[in-house]
Amino acid sequence: MASPLCGGNNGTSTNSLLPSADKQPVSKDSTGGIDVYINMDNVHLLNQLRRETRNSEHPLINYWFKYGLLLAVMGMLQEQERREKIREDKPESEPSGESEEGVETHSSRAIEIASSGLAPVIVPIIRRLAQGPTK
């Protein structure tokens, strides 16, 4: 699995997945791989870190956030590719089941929006899953 490219906003926390306005959240690199930029100054991550009183847990929370979002983005990209393949293979006369607006939601902007929605819940989800089933 590729490592996410991480960055911040020069000390200003935001709700965005992006580390800065000049980067795309998901882009192809020169080798044909995918770069995923994750904003490690995300306000939701910073809130999780402030709530955790044990500083020894901060690297683990950063890890959960970074790789949790990376895995979610990779899943969205895989689903996007699967849907595009189906759309390409389907004859023009067959209805796609998607509206005109639905076709546009497969962009990297849609993935950025969905990832921003995951940002507030990714650490609590992983923390709860790490505890195992409740007895």
Image: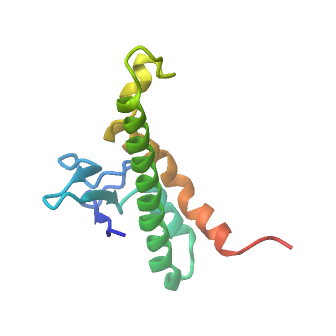
Left of 53 or right of it: where is 129?
A: right
Q: Residue at x 42, y 50 (%)?
A: 78
Residue 50, how many percent across, how many down?
Answer: 51, 68
Q: Quadrant of the N terminus?
A: bottom left
Q: Residue at x 40, y 56 (%)?
A: 42
Q: Residue at x 34, y 58 (%)?
A: 39
50 above or below 14? below
Q: Quadrant of the C terminus?
A: bottom right
- Residue 76 at least partly seen: yes
Q: Residue at x 81, y 71 (%)?
A: 134
49 above or below 92? below
View extreme (right): residue: 135
View extreme (top): residue: 93
Residue 66, how many percent across, how many down?
Answer: 41, 66
Residue 132, how many percent across, how many down?
Answer: 72, 74
- Given residues 89 and 29, the one toward you in this image is 89
Q: In the rendered image, which quarter is residue 104 located in?
A: top left
View extreme (bottom): residue: 56
Residue 48, how many percent across, how many down?
Answer: 53, 65
- Please count the marks in the image: 0
Left of 104 or right of it: where is 76?
A: right
76 above or below 123? above
Scheme of colours in the image: rainbow
- Given residues 32 and 130, the one toward you in this image is 32
